[in-house]
Image (cartoon, rainbow, N blue to C red):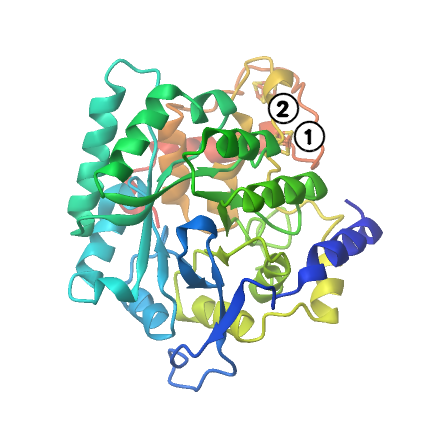
Amino acid sequence: MNRRTFLSVSALAGAGAVVAPQTAFSAVGSHPAGKPANAPIATRVLGRTGMRIPILSMGVMRADNPAVVRAAYRAGLTHFDTAHGYQNGKNEEMLGAFFQDKDRHSFTIATKGKANPSSDDFEQEYEALFTTSLRRLKMDYVDIFYFHAADDVETLTSPRLLTILKKFKDAGHARHIGFSTHAHKPAQIDAAIASGVFDVCLISYNFKLHILPELNAAIRRGVDAGMGFVAMKTMAGGAEDAEGHKRVDGAACLRWVWQNPDITTAIPGFTSFDLLDNCLEAAHAPDVTPSDADYLAGLQEKEMLYCQHCGNCVSQCVRHLPVPALMRAYMYTFGYKHPSLSKETLQELALTGNECAGCKTCTVHCPSGFKVAEKIAAIAPIVNVPSYYLA
Ligand code: SF4
Ligand code: SF4
């Protein structure tokens, strides 16, 4: 998307601005450093779940310091997002320890689990996974349980998956059911609507998306059907450049996301007090400024680190490698500075080395300009680095 198109699409997306009909304001404590909040943080309702939550939530994924979670909670954030696989379970354990003495009505929590609904032991394994997550969290229920990283419509609508998700909800262990997707295909949203099972969609949503008009229309169909939408990958890779040298302005990115009143909350993965402050600054003044719009428009033509997950490369690659997931692994190290997450991603893909070695010419032509073979060669060795060396 070029600069001019971006500005016109953003203007349309922002027609509802932050103070949309479903938006309210609530006073939410003070800044973690003790400074008074500049303004209350707006809250929105997450579709038919009825959960009213601040527009800023915490993606706990990479945080390993409970003091940052405490600061976020004290600053008025109430929704916390984790997953079964994050930090090999330590992320859920940290949240369980932090929240065990807190009023269960003072926060909401989401976790996620991935499994293959076509495997023989799927039901047994998925139930064991969810039970383990609840045990780590020291909770009887989670507010949202997401089927994690749904890549295609077939998996998302598998009868075996839908049956077990309904079972989790009927048993009261998941108040609401959702799915997360990096692929952000409108067809996935339409399939989720048709299933009637998914209350929430956790979706990649940022100013770099090429298919914004189609995606916004699908999100609107979801909202009309009662679904709630939570945004991740809001920083478009975390860096302004393809090398990951300069951190992106997170406040501008978040304000852009909140222009869309159909997005209830964003879950940036801040890991430090500085990054939390940057997000809070945005949440206390959530309207896009002219300088934000100019800044983000100026990044439109840059390569950056965000893979669109368009999937074009998979059929172009002679070995049909899972290139989008590999690009995500690359982004985790060079954008997020979090190599252990790259390693987890590569291990999930069961890749053991540079799968491009021996391929003379790369046949992939990426619309984002990614030199995918170079990126794969750069990230592949991390799978063999012992985890204790990785941040
Ligand atoms: S073609 Fe490029 S943008 Fe599309 S999924 Fe592949 S690497 Fe990502
Ligand atoms: S170099 Fe790698 S990504 Fe490119 S076609 Fe060969 S195997 Fe596929």
| Percent of width and height locating residue 137 | 20, 50
> Does the residue tagged 1 have its C-beta within 8 Å of any atom of ligand 1?
yes
User: What residue appears at the point 56 percent right and 49 percent down from the top-left corner?
Assistant: 237
| In this view, 179 is above or below 10 | above
Cα–Cα span, label 2 and label 1: 7 Å
Numbered-mark total: 2
Q: Secondary structure at mark 1?
A: loop
Left or right: where does residue 48 sit relative to residue 258? left
Q: Position of residue 96 (x, y in %)?
A: 20, 55
Badge 1 crowding class, 10 Å Cα cut-off, few under 14, some 14 to 19, many 20 or more, is some
The amino acid type found where label 2 is placed reads Cys
Q: Please say if 314 is above or below 88.
A: above
Tell which of 203 and 70 is nearer to you.
203
Residue at 57 percent of width and 45 percent of height:
224
* Whether residue 306 can be seen here: no
Mark 2 vs ligand 1: CB under 8 Å?
A: yes
- Disc nearer the start of the sequence (2/1): 2
- The residue under the point 61% across, 34% down is 186
Counting from the top left corner in percent of width and height, residue 317 is at 61, 17
Tell me whether the residue at label 2 lies in contact with that at label 1, contact meaning CB atoms closer than 8 angstroms: yes
Q: Secondary structure at mark 2?
A: helix
* Numbered mark located on residue 313 in the image: 2
User: Which residue is denoted by mark 1 in the rendering?
Assistant: 366
Q: Quadrant of residue 314?
A: top right
- Amino acid type at circle 1 is Cys
The percent coordinates of residue 276 (x first, y second) are 44, 68
In the displayed structure, 196 sits above or below 277; it is: above
Asked if 61 appears above or below 73 in the picture, the reply is: above
